[in-house]
Every structure is written in structure tokens, then in C-alpha cells.
Image (spheres, rainbow, N blue to C red):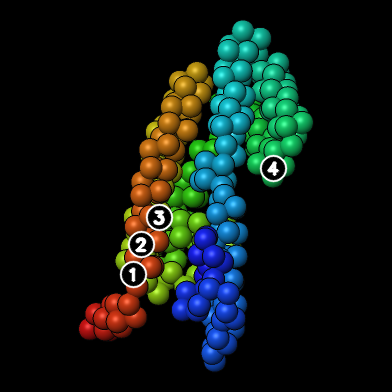
Amino acid sequence: MTTPESGAEFGTEPGSEPVNQPGNETSRETGKESFTARDADSSTTDPTLLEQMGGLTGLVSATLPVLVLIPVNSFWGLGPALIAAVGVAVAITAWRILRKETLQPAISGLLGVALCAAIAWFSGSAKGYFLYGIWMSLILCVLAVASILFRWPAVGVIWKGINGEDMAWRQVPAARRAFAIATGGWAVVFLARFVIQNAIYNADHTTALGVTRIIMGWPLTGLVLILTVWMVKRANAAIEQFSPQETEQENNEHQH
């Protein structure tokens, strides 16, 4: 380490050569590595949870086809409505590609709209557009609950997987509980979507179903995202403060 004025290292006389003591080279190399790691960390900005889910464009691409489908179906029928919904999805996908955004969310969104439109076409009713989302909500609810019961909470698995980290957090009871709470929040959302939207679907109220789909879509997702971010922060804090004795204590409790 040098002073700005003289360039001399602490512990040496100005102008003299520093004394090479055993371990000095190793400590300097370690220091260089730590500074390099910190520089790399500071220069790399991790994507936010919203960005990983497709960003604001993802919110638009999930909502616009439904906004177009309902009124077009009311005035011109099923065929034009499905064409309009798929057309909007194609336009959004093309726009995202031109903006050089990540292709995976864009293509996934387009395929999702195409699948929903195909179900509606073969069912002969516009309400069929929502059938895939309704039953997928039930499946996701079951998977979320199962992941909690098997002590592999889905939020922890997905979050750590997205960030390229291992599953060592499962050995931290507090972190596992935090991820389980977040996963439970998603399970409640999925179950609410299934129960409410399936009831409206069976009542054959297509317009109400479309409105409910939007209201229970990203607005409700935003609420559970707040819970998720809070629990992720708690889990990360627990991992940093983890003591192996916590795991031994929990294992003993389960055995008794």
C-alpha cells in the first residue's frame, strides 16, 4: 500500500526498497485477487426479479392480447378475436427482437398466446382462451405445496438456479423457512386464480373472465413479488449468519 505523497510503502523509509518477508508476496497476490473480485462484482449488475421475468415488456405482452380479445370477440366473433390476439402477440415479439431483448421471454410469451388461441379455436368459445391458464394455476399450486412438503421450496430452487448458485442453502433452516414462506405465497395466489377463474369459466361469463384474468394477473403477482423479495433477503441474511449447529439442532428435533 502506498501513500499518495511519496509512493513509499508503510513500514519502510522513503526511497528504500521494501523488505521481502515470508508471506509478503502471497498476501499481495491475495489482495490483488480480492480487489479484482470486488471490481468484477461492482461492474456486473445482477438483473432484478422483474427483469428475469421479462421486464415491463413482459407485463404488456401478457396483458394486451387479453385486452384485444374480449372486445373484438364481442363485436366480431371468435375468429377475428383470436387473429387479433395472436397478431398483437406477434407484433410485441417482433418489437422485443428489434430492441435486442432476451429472446426466451419473447418467444415463450408468443407460444403461450398461440396455445391459448388454439384451445379457444378447438373449443369453439372465446372463454377457452383462458382454460390453459386456469388449470396451469392449479398445477403450479400443487407443485408449490409439494416443494414445501419435501423441503425443497420452489422459490429457493428457482432463485438460486437463476443466479447460478448451488443448493447449500437447504442446510440453513432459517433460509429454508423463508423460501418456504415465499413459496407458500405463490401457492395461495395460484389457488385463488384457479378457484375464482374456474367458477367464472363454468358460469360462462367470458368478459368477466377476461377482466378477472387481468386483475388477478400482474397486480396480484406484484403483491406476491414483494413478499418474495422480502423473504429472499431474509434467506440471504440467514445464509451469511449460518452456524452448522442450527442444522444439528433441527435434525435432533425431527428425530424426537
Residue 241 is marked as 1
Q: Which label is found at residue 237?
A: 2
Q: Which of 238 and 216 is in front in this view?
A: 238
Q: Nearer the viewer, residue 123 or 185?
A: 185
Mark 1 or mark 4, which is nearer the start of the sequence?
4
- Residue 113 visible? The answer is yes
Amino acid of disc 3: Val
Mark 1: few/some/many CA within 10 Å (<14, 14-19, 20+) = few
Mark 3 surroundings: few (<14), some (14-19) or many (≥20) residues within 10 A: many
* Circle 2 crowding by C-alpha within 10 Å: few under 14, some 14–19, many from 20: few
Dot 1 amino acid type: Gln
Q: Distance between the residues labelled 2 and 4?
A: 30 Å
The circle on residue 251 is none
Quadrant for residue 223, please give it.
top left
Q: Any mark on residue 232, and which?
A: 3
Mark 4 lies on residue? 102
Camera-near label (1 vs 3) is 1
Structural crowding at the residue carrying mark 4, measured as other residues with C-alpha within 10 Å and reported as few (<14), some (14–19) or many (≥20): few
